[in-house]
Each structure stands twice: as C-alpha cells, then as structure tokens.
Image (cartoon, rainbow, N blue to C red):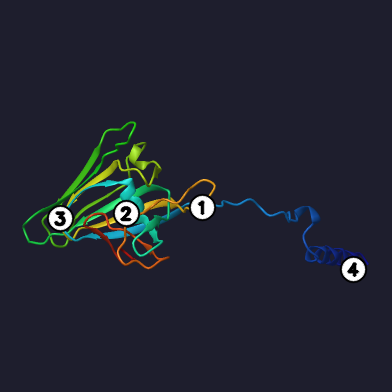
Amino acid sequence: MQRHNVKSIRKNKIGNRKAGPRTSQNKSLQPPHFVAQALRSIRIRTIASGAVNLAITMQQLGQLLGCMAISTTASNLISPLTRVKRISIWAPVSTAGTSVTCQMTWVNMSEDFESPPVTFSDSSVSFDRPAYISQRPPRGALSGKWHSNTLTDSLVTIISVAGTVVDFELEFSLIDDVNNFAAIAGPTLVAATVGQIYHHPIGVLIPQTVNSL
C-alpha cells in the first residue's frame, strides 16, 4: 500500500507539471515598450578613380550614406545624423619598387571648437601588400561624435593614389519621425529613378556594388 501511495503521489506531481506553468509565472499580456527609431550600421566600399586628396565633411558622408530620388535630379537624405565608426584604406602598388603612401587625418574641426588633429600613415613597395590604414576616431575626439548631415566642417582628410579602396563604416538613424526631423535636401542627381536610393560619390571615391549617381 505504501509503494502504491508513493507512486500515486509522484504521478499526481508529474501530471500537475504537464498541466502548465503556475499562474504567478505567466507573462503579462500588455504590449512591451520598443525602440521606434533603432540605430542602423552600414559599410560602404569606395574605389578611387584618380589620385585622392580630400577633406571630407559630414555633409558628404551623409550623401554617401544614401539619398532618395524625389525627381530625376532632386533628392532627400535618408538620415539626419551620422556617426563614423571606422575608416579603412588600402593603397595598391602599381610599379614594383616604387612606393605608395596613404594618409588619414582626423581633423576634428567644428563651428564652435576643435580638438588636436591625429594623423596616420602607411607605405608599401610590394604588390602583395598594399599600404593599409584602418582606424576608429580617437577616443573622446569630436570626430567620433554624432553629427548633423548638413555640416560642412572637415571631419577627416584622406591622401592616397588612384585605385585606392576606402571603406566607410557608419552608424545612422532614418528620417522617419516627422515630429523631430524635417526632410533634408540631398545632392543633385542625373537621370535618377524616383524612389530609388543612391549613394553619392565623394570626389573620386566611387561607391561599389550599389546605386551611385
């Protein structure tokens, strides 16, 4: 009898577990809060169609990030704000024994204040090793902050040779909140398709494998 009672007790316990979780463990049916404007990240690869000697602004980075055609020639930026996460440069050697050099300087200028510039440089004389720089903005520097995509202050300068590959890793938010952001006019396009998103070149730096005008 004792064994039978023990088995019955165990069976009842197992049956209770299968019946479902306790009421106190049930989750609330109330909709949870959520982030309406989540931050997004993107890497845009460009290749230099000629020698590079550019002082790049936030406005140019905003146009490189993306603009939507609203007519065949007019556009609006897809983002009001951008933050630079990293810039990488590969400068190829075109002639054996002839060195190439690439250079990147975080200028850190703004309308109100500036911090000391920081320059990085690398050289190569070998076909199998391009000159290479890959840097995040210096810790605490102005260049690592969020900026409006309308600013025309220089953020970074790049000097390199034709054929250089430059990757821009950017963080951004979309203009999809009419209460906080108005439309921002983008660059003039040529024979664009309305509704398409284009990545606008920065001088000789031409975006690769994406729409570009």
Residue farthest to the top, as pictured = 113
Asked if the residue at tag 4 contacts the one at tag 1, i.e. Cβ–Cβ closer than 8 Å, the answer is no
- Name the side, left or right, on which 84 lies relative to 174: left
**Quadrant in which the C terminus is drawn:** bottom left
Q: Which mark is residue 168?
A: 2
Q: Nearer the viewer, residue 127 or 137?
A: 137
Q: Which circle's residue, 1 or 3, is located before the other in the chain?
A: 1
Query: Which numbered marker is on residue 4?
Result: 4
Query: x, y (%) of residue 95?
Result: 7, 61
- Which of the two discs, 4 and 2, sits closer to the camera? 2
Q: Which residue is mark 3?
A: 51
Q: Residue at x 24, y 54 (%)?
A: 89
| Among numbered discs 1 and 2, the one appearing first in the sequence | 1
Q: Residue at x 90, y 68 (%)?
A: 4
Spatial distance from mark 1 to mark 2, Cα to Cα?
20 Å
Quarter of the view holding residue 143: top left
Location of residue 86 in the rendering, given as x and y in whole percent from the top left corner: 33, 50
Question: In the rendered structure, are the residues bearing label 2 and label 3 in contact, judged by CB atoms less than 8 Å apart?
Answer: no
Label 1's element?
loop
Q: Which class describes the residues within 10 Å of circle 2: few (<14), some (14-19), or many (20+)?
A: some
Q: Which residue is mark 1?
A: 38
Residue placed most toward the observer, 162 or 102? 162
48 left or right of 199?
A: left
Secondary structure found at label 2? strand
Tag 1–tag 2 contact (CB < 8 Å): no
Q: CA distance from mark 3 to mark 4?
A: 90 Å
Q: CA distance from mark 1 to mark 3?
A: 37 Å
Distance from Cα at disc 1 to Cα at disc 4: 60 Å
